Image (cartoon, grey):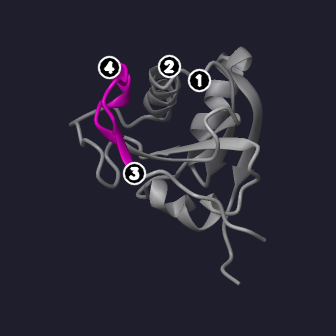
Amino acid sequence: MATRPLSATRHCTSSGPASGAGAPVRRGGPPRGHPAVLVHGYVDSWRTFEPLLRHLPPSLHVYAPTQRGHGDAAKPPGGYLPEDFAADLLAFMDSVGIGRAVLVGGSSGGVQARIVAARHPDRVAGRCHVVGCVRA
């Protein structure tokens, strides 16, 4: 299977107040592709999805942000409840102009994706919960 190009890691500086402006985000795929947001679990970062990013279908434009308190993202003193991360996810989507996306939650990232899907079904085109990855 051919791999696809990825953009450099960028820091999202236009995020809403809940999202922790300055959070790193990795993007890949054509800008006009169907948006998909990859949501990592606790004590992780966007890098958990790095092996997967090059093998996704070219019809997707993928965003893999790092959540507050993780990796190179800002580490505020509070705001670490699942509801806070879900609010951050929505703020991130707003900041990059995503009206509706497929949400892919890795491990506990699935909790945030599920909260967003339940509270804002109009913003979610689909949802997938990835429990683990196996390296072949």
Which residue does the image show at 78% across and 71% down from the upper left? 1
**Which residue is at the front of the view, 58 or 67?**
58
Q: Amino acid at mark 4?
A: Pro
Q: Amino acid at mark 1?
A: Ile
- Could you tell me residue 89's position as x and y percent? 50, 30
Residue 9 marker:
3
Q: CA distance from mark 3 to mark 4?
A: 21 Å
Proximity of marks 1 and 2: CB atoms separated by less than 8 Å:
yes
For the residues carrying marks 2 and 4, which lies nearer the camera in this image?
A: 2
The residue beneath circle 1 is 98
Residue 94 marker:
2
Q: CA distance from mark 1 to mark 2?
A: 6 Å
- In the image, taking residue 91 as reference, residue 110 lies left or right, namely right
For the residues carrying marks 1 and 4, which lies nearer the camera in this image?
A: 1
- Residue extent of the magenta highlight: 10-23
> Outermost residue toward the bottom?
136
Q: CA distance from mark 1 to mark 4?
A: 17 Å
Q: Is residue 11 above or below residue 9?
A: above
The residue beneath circle 4 is 17
Q: Amino acid at mark 2?
A: Asp
Specify whether residue 94 is painted magenta: no
Q: CA distance from mark 1 to mark 3?
A: 18 Å
